[in-house]
Image (cartoon, rainbow, N blue to C red):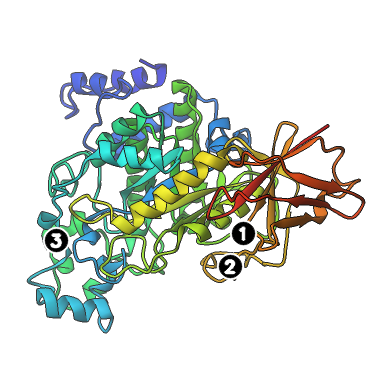
Amino acid sequence: MSTGIAKKLSGLTPCSGVDILSIVYYFTPGVNYMNTISENLIRIEEVIAQGPFAASWDSLEGYEVPAWYEDAKFGVFIHWGVYSVPGFGNEWYPRNMYTQGSAEFEHHLKTYGPHNKFGYKDFIPMFKAEKWDPEQWAELFERAGARFVMPVAEHHDGYAMYDCAFHDWTSVKTGPHRDILGELSSALQKRGIEFTCSSHREEHWWFYDAGMNFDSDVRDEAYRSLYGPARPEAERPNKEWLEEWLVYTCEIIDKYRPKVLWFDWWIKTPAYQPYLQKLAAYYYNRAAEWEIGVAINYKENTFREGTAVFDIERGQLTGIRPMFWQTDTAIAKNSWGFTHGQDYKDAGSIIGDMADIVSKNGALLLNIGPRPDGTIPEEEQQVLLEIGKWLSLNGEAIYGSRPWKKFGEGPTQVVEGTFNDVKRSPFTCEDIRFTTKGDILYAIIMDWPASGKVIIMSLAKGQIASIGKVELLGSPETLKWSWDDNDLTVYLGETRPSDYAVVLRVSPA
């Protein structure tokens, strides 16, 4: 037991209202959690005090992105929860169903009745996950070529998809009566896939506020632990809420040891700043104790540069970012969670985005939305398998790669920023992206040229030191090529190894 904890215990008496044996059990790492927020805050401070990281941006700048993450390049995000039961609109149904005048509000009234008779809580018994098989999921993700997988631990709706010690609105105590995070983590680890997760609990402060404006079950105190404070978004979260958020998040860290912890945008709210520093110090210190490499994902300017990994939602960058970053986006254009009538992207466009992102020092986190019974829609499975097929052939240009001095060339312009991943025109055969691994350079040709010839101006003499061999991954043919001061011209031959982008391996002399 640490000295600080021993001092705290020495001041307790039999009248303190705290059982000493319970405290000793509680402070055994990874064993148990006590019931109150204040008791858990003591432990969090103890872990931070042990170092090596302190709860300050200056200290956190000593953080380094783990090599496994920089090498992984491709992961699967999973938005699955109670919101998949109505399957209408998107994963914000639990908020929008209480927003008077919205399509979700009208749909709810027509389909389920008044909100004071049938609220969001009443979907929970319908969320059974009766066909869910984490081993099948893990097998699919392995075939898709995913190197890490990120289920949502808790979305804005306040329903925990894990064994939370602090309330009863969890997948263990209700609905499926299963520890979704725990079971999936175990299945992934068997296949060598890194387990990561997201928490969106910060938005729970205001997510149900519209339900306070009329006669709905959100106003019923009996369901306060599910519906949360339901305060206006503009209202600053109070100390009690912020401390609760910190403790909830640290519980996920301790119980499941995720290799990446992802947060949504609302942690940019200034009130969260000191708590983010505590959370990061706690997480990084625990990772050091466990001897694992971890990362935090953040959006916008929430974290100081170099203290975590920058993430762009449904968007890309126009150039190489010196520091590793990530795009999170979804197979469906209209929703992250399951809905009836999804509008899907095709595998080719996603592969093109992956190549573009990786060439700029990023990783792609691609979301799926399972049905409430735990099955993954067939269309989404097919896209994942097509990506996996492409990676099995061309993965050496992706996994473990690093950017070249130039990300690429070609006419198609990526629109930088969030929510822009469907705004660009399709990539063409003139669009080329570069990656490197050791002294090998890869040129990813985004589409097959009708002429069978590709001209790469970025690889003209003087731009690259030497060329000894040019190969097309997946093709048995010996390629013809010429190299001069203007460009590298390669004749791709008769064999097209992929329906999507193709990859040239350029080796030095």
Q: In the rendered image of this protein, does residue 493 appear above or below residue 222?
A: above
Q: Which of 268 and 394 is in front in this view?
A: 394
Depth check, mark 2 against mark 1: the one in front is: 1
Q: Please give the label number shown on residue 426.
A: 2
Q: Which of 330 and 431 is in front in this view?
A: 431
From the top left corner, tell me how far across and down residue 506 is, in percent.
Answer: 74, 40
**Which kind of residue does numbered mark 2 sit on?**
Pro
Tell me, yes or no, whether the two marked residues, 2 and 1, touch with CB atoms within 8 Å. yes
Q: Mark 1 points at which residue?
A: 447
Mark 2 or 1 closer to N-term?
Answer: 2
Give me the residue at 28% from left, 56% from top: 377
Q: In the rendered image of this protein, does residue 139 appear above or below residue 204?
A: above
Q: In the rendered image of this protein, does residue 117 appear above or below residue 37?
A: below
SS for dot 2: loop
From the top left corner, tell me how far across and down residue 402 is, in percent.
Answer: 67, 39
Q: How far apart are marks 3 and 2 (CA)?
A: 40 Å
Quadrant of residue 456 within the rendered picture: bottom right
Give me the residue at 80% from left, 47% from top: 481
Depth check, mark 3 against mark 2: the one in front is: 2
Residue density around tag 2, few if under 14, some if 14–19, many if 20 or more, within 10 Å: some
Give me the residue at 34% from left, 69% from top: 232
Q: How far apart are marks 3 and 1 (CA)?
A: 45 Å
On-image quarter of the N terminus: top left
Looking at the image, which residue sits at the far bottom?
101
SS for dot 3: helix
From the top left corner, tell me how far across and down residue 429 is, in percent.
Answer: 66, 61
Q: Name the residue under label 3.
A: 123
Number of marks in the rendered image = 3
